[in-house]
Amino acid sequence: MTDPHSADAPETQNDDPDILDETTTSGSSRRVIALIGGALVLLIIGAGLAMIFAPGPSAPAAAIAPTTATTALTNATPAASDLPTPSVPTALPLPQAIGDMSSTEPVAQVGDTMITRGEFVQAYQPGTPPGDVLKQLIQVELVLQAAKAEGVIVDQSKIDDQIVQIKQQNAINDAAAFDAFLQQNNIASEDALRGIIARSQLLDQMLMTHTTIEQAHVRHIMLMSSGDQSDARKAEAEALLKQIQDGADFAQLASEKSEDTNSKDEGGDLGWIPQGIFGLGFDEALFSMKQGELRVVQSQYGWHVIELLDLPEVRGLDNTDLLSTAPGQQALNDTFLPWVDQLQSTAEAAQQIKILVTDDQLVTTPGA
């Protein structure tokens, strides 16, 4: 079954009733990496942490359909015996970053902060345009500086929890083994790792705050149904609604009756959600209801008793899982990425960004 907040889920259709599945920080961050695309793709959680929580191999991209012209040429291809033997091209070496991760040589300046060659080397993937990588480093630094200006605070307890998680996932039981593990991942010390996780937290919080979309706060009791079960489950939902209207406690009924296993223990509370999570029928009801109103509605999952806790408003995201939904991705493209571009434009206008090296000083030029 597919999590409706998974990047692999259809825009409004899937079969899993488990909504807003709790994930580890690493899981959320991996999804962020997959979704961000151009602007912050390499560094949203820091290259070092990405190595520790490396995601599995992604599926290959879908093949591009041939154009009409290509199809016509294919249909007109002569017999194989009439064709010359093709030559096999020799693969050209890819550009490589110059220097190593320990280098403190400044390659760019953002305000009072220097971006070092070591940071560039850590972020660079062979063959990537160096200017793009440097732009990403600059944008990450701008987001971090914006976090400081907005007073965003790092949660040290979450850092402690993630350190414990890293040790558990890698079966590390003593300090020497942990030091060796960090060295293998090009992380100088536990303090350096804590800095990477703190940076991840700040970036994640800014991502959530500045990805904005209209959302409503709702709780529900969900009864799964399909086919000939629908009428019976609708009747059950209506009976639950009647109990609530007669004074039964919504949260208690949700914990006992709801088949959404991830919200039932929260009294059915789904938090703030945008349109497009449960489908058209659910959305039409939710975004037309009055605060405190109760209704029975149908979605692709089944029947729901829903209560609107807070009226819709445009706000940042509270849950990183929303980024892997179609509305979350659209909101990211429409709000967060333009906000980052505006940070850069403002900094450039104030002459706060300086590039200190040329591309050929950052990467090798094969064949030159």
Image (tube, rainbow, N blue to C red):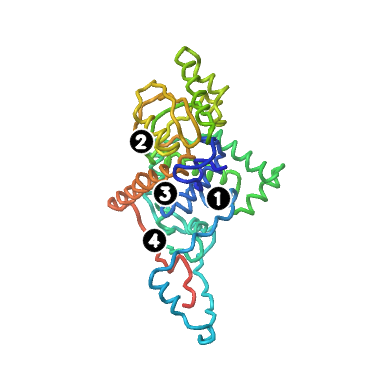
Looking at marks 2 and 4 on the same chain, the residue that comes earlier in the sequence is marked by 2
Residue 337: image tag: none
Which percent across, then down, holds residue 145?
Answer: 40, 44
Q: Is residue 182 left or right of residue 64?
A: right
Residue carrying label 2 = 214
Q: What separation in Å lies between label 1 and label 4 (alpha carbons)?
A: 27 Å
Closer to the eye: label 2 or 4? 2
Q: What separation in Å lies between label 1 and label 2 (alpha carbons)?
A: 31 Å
Q: Secondary structure at mark 3?
A: helix
Residue 50: image tag: 1
Q: What separation in Å lies between label 3 and label 2 (alpha carbons)?
A: 28 Å
Give the crowd class for mark 1: few <14, some 14-19, many >=20 residues within 10 Å: many
Residue carrying label 4 = 356
Which percent across, then down, holds residue 285?
Answer: 38, 30
Task: Looking at this view, name the residue that lies furthest to the front.
Answer: 228
Task: Looking at this view, name the residue that lies furthest to the left.
Answer: 349
Give the crowd class for mark 2: few <14, some 14-19, many >=20 residues within 10 Å: some
Q: Is residue 106 left or right of residue 55?
A: left
